[in-house]
Image (spheres, grey):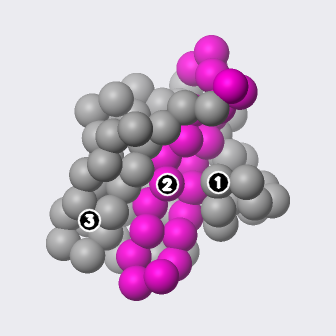
Amino acid sequence: MTTLSEGDVTARYFETDDERVLELSREGRTAVVAQNREGYGMLKVRETADGSELERYYGFDMALDHAAERLGVRPNDLPVPDVAADMGM
């Protein structure tokens, strides 16, 4: 697991048997961007790592926009660990 904080937003990147997961949290709220373990395909945005899918995106930037909106920050305010920087198609 890799953790990175910037301001009041914390990012945790980890991998499960099936997915690469970027979990972002701020003030008790979370937004998760997940991608299949093989590193291709659409990104899923969820409220929690094991929650229901809210939306799917091809691009990482669009998924981050959605996550930022859920957390009430600008997309540029989201810390993204280097290991997660290549998520998306």
Instruction: State whether residue 25 appears in this view.
Output: yes
30 is within the stretch colored magenta: yes
Separation of marks 3 and 1 at Cα, in angstroms: 21 Å
Q: Nearer the viewer, residue 86 or 22?
A: 22
Q: Quadrant of residue 47?
A: bottom right
Which of the marked residues, 3 or 1, is nearer the chain's N terminus? 1
User: Residue 23: which numbered mark, if any?
Assistant: 2
Residue 32, given in percent of the width and then of the height, sits at 57, 56
- In the image, taking residue 68 as reference, residue 76 lies left or right, namely left
Instruction: State whether residue 60 appears in this view.
Output: no
Which of the marked residues, 2 or 1, is nearer the chain's N terminus? 2
Residue type at the position of mark 1: Ala
Residue 33, given in percent of the width and then of the height, sits at 56, 49
- Say few, some or many: other residues with alpha carbon within 10 Å of mark 2 (under 14 / 14 to 19 / 20 or more): many
39 is within the stretch colored magenta: yes
Residue type at the position of mark 3: Asp
Separation of marks 2 and 3 at Cα, in angstroms: 14 Å
Q: Residue at x 48, y 38 (%)?
A: 14
Separation of marks 2 and 1 at Cα, in angstroms: 7 Å
Q: Which residue is mark 3?
A: 77
Residue type at the position of mark 2: Glu
Which of the marked residues, 2 or 3, is nearer the chain's N terminus? 2
Mark 2 falls on what kind of element? strand
